[in-house]
Amino acid sequence: MSKERIEQLIHSKMNESSLIDTSIKGVQLFKITNSVRCSPAVYEPSVTAIVRGGKEAIVDGKKHVYDNSRYISCTMSMPIETGAPNCSPDDPLIGVYISLDTSLMTELTLELTSSAGSFRTPKNTSHSQGLSTALWDDDFTDALYRLLQLDKKTLDLAILEKSRLRELYYTILKGEAGNAFRSAFGVGNEIARSIEFLSSSLDQPVTIEEMADQIGMSRAVFHRKFKQATNMSPIQFVKSMRLNSAATKIAEGTNVNIAAMEVGYVSSSQFSREFKRMYGLSPKQWSQTQHQIV
């Protein structure tokens, strides 16, 4: 099954630059025709597959570049910078964004673990639990195409949606990103749970001790395991998550002061200082220059 057929399917559903929802749970199609410089965002657990063009994602200063040879996997909420600086009308960015059903992924991960205790980790598998790229292989292509074929087919969708999502998730778990997903959704997923706790409490003054206590770890052990999983210290991660979340809200039209309060900042002046230190612009300056991208 060729990737060209997936591109043709996307072209049949959209002509202009846009991001559209499909009738499949968590699945969106996108086409970007203008250059978009990297800007802050927060990725939820997801997979992004590019069928044409190239895209960049930056986490803690490390750049991930991916195209139709590698899809990008995010196993937990992550503050990142993302963009498509090289795309144009002649060379657009076209792809699929899949927001993961975390309950289904957990169910499948535990089922796989119990059914295949001796499951071998594929060569070149990433050990990062946060953001990584994985080889786009034939199994992934077949599963993705079969899933997209369900769009707008009401009866097929009602009967086959969960099984086709399971099929796609299974190819991901078997691929290069599989170890990261099994770590985040299987037994021993403490760091993923602590990040989920943080993500639901951004408007509260959560401390590192509270995050460690919430999963029953000492601060020292938590700090070490957290950095192994995300390549950032807990303090760096919390600040990046809050500022990136605020930046996304501002880009969507939220008032700067309200956005600051919604991510836990009491002082608007402190928020502005830290925002400018991270992004080089004040919140108001930045809001006038940004275009959001998946």
Image: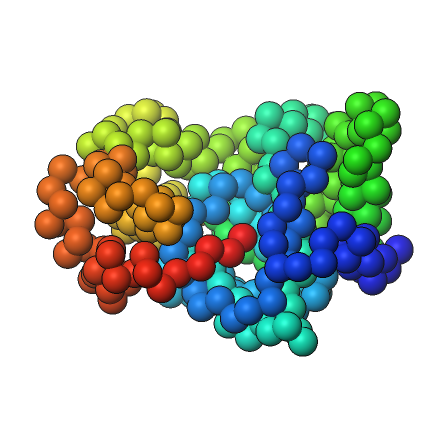
Q: Quadrant of residue 110?
A: top right
Image quarter (top left, top right, bottom left or bottom right) of the N terminus? bottom right
Q: Is residue 96 above or below residue 281?
A: above
Tell me if I can see residue 266 in this picture.
yes
Q: Is residue 139 left or right of residue 258?
A: right
Q: Is residue 246 left or right of residue 35?
A: left
The residue lying at 63 percent from left, 64 percent from top is 93
Q: Position of residue 76 (x, y in %)?
A: 48, 41
Frontmost residue, 65 versus 106? 65
Q: Is residue 169 left or right of residue 212?
A: right
Frontmost residue, 16 versus 142? 16
The residue lying at 31 percent from left, 29 percent from top is 201
The residue lying at 63 percent from left, 36 percent from top is 26
Frontmost residue, 25 versus 171? 25
Q: Quadrant of residue 38?
A: bottom left
Q: Position of residue 157 (x, y in %)?
A: 80, 29
The residue lying at 45 percent from left, 36 percent from top is 192
Q: Is residue 288 left or right of residue 107?
A: left
Tell me if I can see residue 141 in this picture.
no
Q: Residue furthest right?
A: 1
Q: Position of residue 230 (x, y in %)?
A: 41, 49
